[in-house]
Amino acid sequence: MKQLVAQPLTAQAFAPYGTVLAAPAGQGRLINGGNAERFDLVDDLQLGAEGGRPQLALFRAQARRFPHAVTEMERHALGSQSFVPLGERRFVIVVAPAGAAPAAEALAAFVTDGRQGVTLAPGTWHHALLAVDAGDFVVAERAGAVVDCDTCELVTAATVEYRA
């Protein structure tokens, strides 16, 4: 059985799977008469394939127990999917590159610092939301007449843990 230890989420390490969403350092673009700064995080969420449209959802997640068995992965081939915690909520994201159904050896795991979110690139394999801290997450994803969720069972299961 493959054992994964979730690594701290960084933009560089996560780049093969998507984009890390976090408040950037430095100044943003002043808006609203100088009362706010704007930081554009992702300029193309890729949600329009095959007649798709953007959908914003709220996931109310229960905290998971770790180590956690990873036996199934999913992907959204027609659009990206973003997870953003409301408040400080850590979560573990288990991913594998886009392409054929992954083997356990291809999995990578990351843990957020509680203020980070992610946008998964279209086709990236991932495990369902693994909340470390219970609470609400905003999810932006593609909605449309064509269902965009493929799942696969792992031939060899894996476990994921994180270290606080």
Image (tube, rainbow, N blue to C red):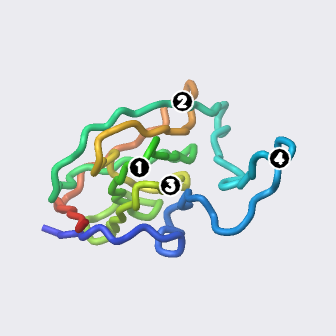
Is the residue marked by circle 1 packed among few (<14), some (14-19), or many (20+) residues within 10 Å? some
Q: What's the distance in space between the residues labelled 3 and 1, CA to CA? A: 14 Å
**Number of the label disc, if any, that sits on residue 88:** 1
In which quadrant will I find the C terminus?
A: bottom left
Total number of numbered labels?
Answer: 4
Residue type at numbered disc 4: Ile
Residue type at numbered disc 1: Glu
Query: Could you tell me which residue is drawn at 44 percent across and 44 percent down?
Result: 87
- Residue reaching furthest top? 145
Eyeballing the image, is 19 above or below 52?
Answer: below
Residue type at numbered disc 3: Val
- Residue reaching furthest bottom? 12
The mark nearer the N terminus, 4 or 2, is: 4
| x then y, percent, for residue 67 | 15, 59
**Number of the label disc, if any, that sits on residue 146:** 2
Query: Could you tell me which residue is drawn at 56 percent across and 47 percent down?
Result: 80
**Number of the label disc, if any, that sits on residue 118:** 3
| x then y, percent, for residue 50 | 64, 35
| x then y, percent, for residue 60 | 35, 32
Q: What element carries label 4?
A: strand
Q: Is mark 1 on a helix, strand or loop?
A: loop
User: Do the residues under discs 4 and 2 have CB atoms within 8 angstroms?
Assistant: no
- State which quadrant residue 2 falls in: bottom left
Determine which residue is flagged by label 4: 31
